[in-house]
Amino acid sequence: MPRLSEAEIAEQLAQRPDWSLKNNEIVRTFRLANFPAAIAFVTHVAFLAEAAGHHPDIDIRYNRVRLALTTHDAGGLTEKDFALAAAIDEILG
């Protein structure tokens, strides 16, 4: 899958305002009610990621979950990253 251009990344980020660009990744931190809710959320993300064959970096800090997406084998951001970000956004509504 080809990497997105800077213009394409900006366009995609405009559609995902809760995500930001950092070091060639798109990242978002989610705040959940508590630790069990954070783990349940991560489990849901894991199933989405596995189905997509695209796996985010995940950092859990009690009720905060930070997700980072990039397409390592493409060397940058691709449509896969933004498609998974959109699916993840739908989990919490």
Image (tube, helix red, strand yellow):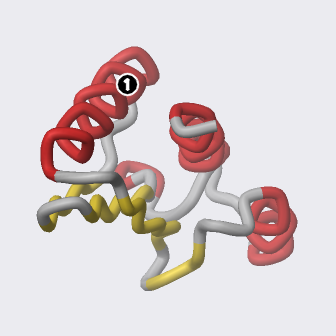
Residue plotted at (41% across, 24% down): 48
Number of numbered discs visible in the structure rendering: 1
| Residue at which label 1 appears | 53
- Res 67 quadrant in image: bottom left
Does any portion of residue 91 appear in the rendered image? Answer: yes
Residue at far top of view: 51
Residue 59 occupies which quadrant of the picture?
Answer: bottom left
Which quadrant would the C terminus be assigned to in this image?
Answer: top right
Q: What residue type is labelled 1?
A: Gly
Horizontal and vertical percent for residue 82? 63, 48
**Disc 1 packing (10 Å; few <14; some 14–19; many ≥20):** few
Task: Give left or right: position of 8 versus 83.
Answer: right
* SS category of the residue bearing label 1: loop
Q: In the image, residue 49 lies at what x, y percent?
A: 37, 29
Residue 64 lies, with reference to residue 35, above or below; the image says below
Pick out the residue farthest to the front: 33
Would residue 71 be found to the left or right of residue 61 on screen?
right
Q: Where is residue 7 in the image (x, y as percent from the top left)?
A: 85, 74
The residue at 57%/46% (across/down) is: 85
Left or right: residue 27 compared with residue 33? right
Above or below for 61 versus 86:
below
Q: Nearer the viewer, residue 7 or 36?
A: 36
Report x, y in % for residue 28. Answer: 47, 66
The answer to whether residue 47 is above or below residue 14 is above
Kindly tell me whether residue 1 is visible in this rendering. Answer: no
* Residue at image location 59% in from the left, 76% down from the top: 20
Question: 61 or 56: which is nearer to us?
Answer: 61
Please identify the quadrant where the N terminus is shown. top right
Q: Which of 53 and 72 is in front in this view?
A: 53
